[in-house]
Amino acid sequence: MLSVLLAGLALSDRALAIVSQDGTGRLPAMGWNSWNEYACDITEEDFVKTGELLISLGLKDVGYEYINIDDCWSDKEKKRDPTTKEIIIDTAKFPNGISHLADTIHGLGLKLGIYSDAGAETCAGYAGSLGYEAIDAATFSKWGIDYLKYDNCAVPEEVKDEYEFIPEELSDNAPPDYDWSTSNTAKRYRAMRDALLKQNRTIQYSLCAWGHAHVEEWGNTTGHSWRMWGDIMPMWAGKEKWSWGLMPIVNQAAFLWNYTDFWGHNDWDMLEVGNGNLTFEESRSHFTLWAALKSPLIIGTKLDTIEKPILDILSNKEIIAFNQDPVYGASARPFKWDGVYDMEHPAAYWVGTSVKGIHLFLLNSHDKAQRMRTRFSEIPALSEKKGDRYLVRDMWAGKDLGVYKGDISVVVATHGTAALRITKLDGSHPNPVQGGIVRCTSVQRQFGMESAKMCHVQFSQK
Ligand SMILES: *[C@@H]1O[C@H](CO)[C@@H](O)[C@H](O)[C@H]1NC(C)=O
Ligand SMILES: *[C@@H]1O[C@H](CO)[C@@H](O)[C@H](O)[C@H]1NC(C)=O
Ligand SMILES: *[C@@H]1O[C@H](CO)[C@@H](O)[C@H](O)[C@H]1NC(C)=O
Ligand SMILES: *[C@@H]1O[C@H](CO)[C@@H](O)[C@H](O)[C@H]1NC(C)=O
């Protein structure tokens, strides 16, 4: 029986994403992570307080559900128990243990995430999980963990990849037909996937391999989301050491937006909304574009001191609804763009579809306000319908701009992003989905457990 199951798994492995009956990972994850504002300076109290704030600020109500512990939660010196080999918790930071924290977070109706690394050590030098995948997955499951961010530091020499691909350097020395899913990086990430799948617990699996080894080509069969680039930092453009501003990341997304769909998402890194000296417009662009790209929306700012305008950005229901659309899984994509690689001025005109209509996202990467104009006939989803009139809505103002024929033009502030929704005059979808329903077929996926479902959306476009 077991061998039959294994054979079936091996055959279907390439085609299958990690799907689960409760829908975990079908849509981009939404939550909060400690790294961007706290780094290693974390305590149990920070996570409990953040969970409570997620509720009192209304963020849970708009969909944020994960409270994620990043690096530095374990005992840096002792690392592992000499007998059980389990990672030892830093009891100064988590005096009641992680399991107790998970109970508290679950008691708030939220979920708890944790962090580890597919190497010998984490990026900050704490115990890594390479070689300990089975033990650590079992430990996380036992504690009641719901989400694992899995980083890529301290990879031992003997398991380094044969070839190298680093997205920022555009370096790819593999033969043209090389299958990156056979790389050691893919193997290191699959080892943890397999260990997680053996647990009697659904754990969302967030790969953090920074776009290396063309993770976008094997991410969908390995985890629910995968980082596509080096670390983000709160600045508009440029880079500092291994961290990058927003524009270089958006530029990369203009080329690789199409690797995202249900169950598997390009992760353009956690949100810096409200951090550093991003202006209000820049924070709003950041949130709009990450939502449009169907990236996970993981807040990275302190919630106890959050300012109202920043909270309003993170709570915009129309923008979130695009990111979490139940019927259209694809990312927004660029149009009116010549495909030029430009880290300062990436693709400016983006279009996407949701159950509510066709959406335009117009990015002004320039240092002064710009009037941005597009003919409806230039918009791929509308190009067949020349001469039609459309109702256009401003998703940020939350109001209709009016009825337009031929074209639409809006003034976009410096480093701003307009978010518009286009429908027919009566508000109906210009490209309705017919029978746009999720169909699931049962697939035996996890050992000794009830079968999980493989789901996809079936619809025909008029
Ligand atoms: C798996 O977990 C469920 C729910 O937590 C529980 O009811 C069930 O008994 C568990 N199954 C096994 C085999 O441990
Ligand atoms: C995405 O687009 C690229 C370039 O057009 C293509 O090579 C690749 O196969 C596409 N991938 C997916 C998953 O659609
Ligand atoms: C990822 O896998 C799921 C489930 O098999 C599939 O629906 C989706 O289209 C895949 N994503 C991409 C980008 O191919
Ligand atoms: C803020 O922006 C200025 C000017 O662009 C830059 O020099 C400075 O380093 C930034 N500060 C932070 C904290 O990002």
Image (tube, rainbow, N blue to C red):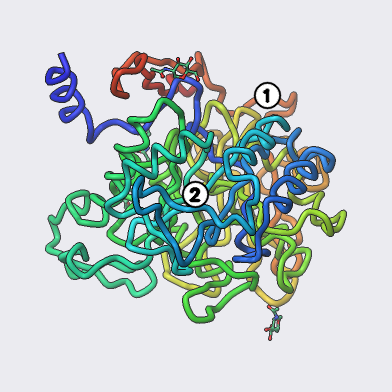
Q: Quadrant of the N terminus?
A: top left
Mark 1 and mark 2 residues within 8 Å of each other at the beta carbon? no
Q: Residue at x 35, y 42 (%)?
A: 135
Side (left or right) of 153 relative to 237: left
Can you give x and y, in whole percent of width and height, for residue 254 in the image?
Answer: 46, 58
Lower position in the chain sequence, tag 1 or tag 2: 2
Q: Quadrant of ligand 1?
A: top left
- Residue 20 on image: x %, y %: 43, 24
CA distance for labels 1 and 2: 22 Å
- Please name the amino acid that badge 2 sits on: Arg
The one nearer the camera, 401 or 377, is 401
- Going by the numbered disc 1, the residue's amino acid type is Ser
Q: Nearer the viewer, residue 357 or 250?
A: 250
Q: Which residue is mark 2?
A: 333
In this view, which residue lies farthest toward the front? Answer: 83
Q: Is mark 1 within 8 Å of ligand 3?
A: no
Picture coordinates of residue 62 (x, y %)?
73, 35
Q: Is residue 133 visible?
A: yes
Q: What residue lies at 50% left-to-right and 16% top-to-bottom? A: 437
- Taking 60 as reference, is 335 left or right? left
- Which residue is pictured at 52% across the width and 37% down the height? 143
Q: Can you tell which mark lies on residue 428? A: 1
Please tell me whether residue 112 is drawn above or below residue 177 in the rendered image. Answer: above
Depth-wise, is mark 1 or mark 2 nearer the camera? 2
Label count reads 2
Q: Quadrant of residue 358?
A: top right
